[in-house]
Image (tube, rainbow, N blue to C red):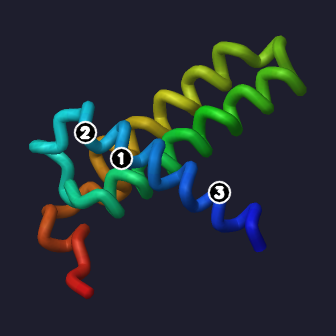
């Protein structure tokens, strides 16, 4: 159980470090929770790209293009409709 707690503490510390150093003015969810979620998604895309490159280094350009597409989706959203259709209030 101690490992889970330590992992959560590390996540919080890293999230707080990023939270204090980035410009959150254009983020849809600029809360600590939103920034940590975005950070996790970006790191997941980056790690997936690195892993894919190690398996298939000859596909470097395709992997770079996919990574850039993932970042574009994070930045712009997946929908092409108006913003009101993209955001669901909970």
Q: Position of residue 66 (x, y in %)?
A: 58, 32
Q: Residue at x 55, y 57 (%)?
A: 9
Q: Which mark is residue 86?
A: none
> CA gap, disc 1 to disc 2?
6 Å
User: From the image, which quarter does the C terminus lie in?
Assistant: bottom left
Q: Residue at x 24, y 68 (%)?
A: 86
84 or 9, which lies in front? Answer: 9
Residue behind mark 3: 7
User: Could you tell me which secondary element the residue under label 2 belongs to?
Assistant: helix
Residue behind mark 2: 20
On the picture, is 72 further left or further right than 56?
Answer: left
Q: Return the disc, 3 or 2, that comes first in the chain's sequence.
A: 3
- 63 versus 60 height, above or below: below
Q: Residue at x 21, y 62 (%)?
A: 81
On the picture, is 86 further left or further right than 70?
Answer: left
Q: Position of residue 1 (x, y in %)?
A: 77, 73
Q: Are marks 1 and 3 in contact (CB under 8 Å)?
A: no
25 or 16, which lies in front? Answer: 16
């Amino acid at each position: 159980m101690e490992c889970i707690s330590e992992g959560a503490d590390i996540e919080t510390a890293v999230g707080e470090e990023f939270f204090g150093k980035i410009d959150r003015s254009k983020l849809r969810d600029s809360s600590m929770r939103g920034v940590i979620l975005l950070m996790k998604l970006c790191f997941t895309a980056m790690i997936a790209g690195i892993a894919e490159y190690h398996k298939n280094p000859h596909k470097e350009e395709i992997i770079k293009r996919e990574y850039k597409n993932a970042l574009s989706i994070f930045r712009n959203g997946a929908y092409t409709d108006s913003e009101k259709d993209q955001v669901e209030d909970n």
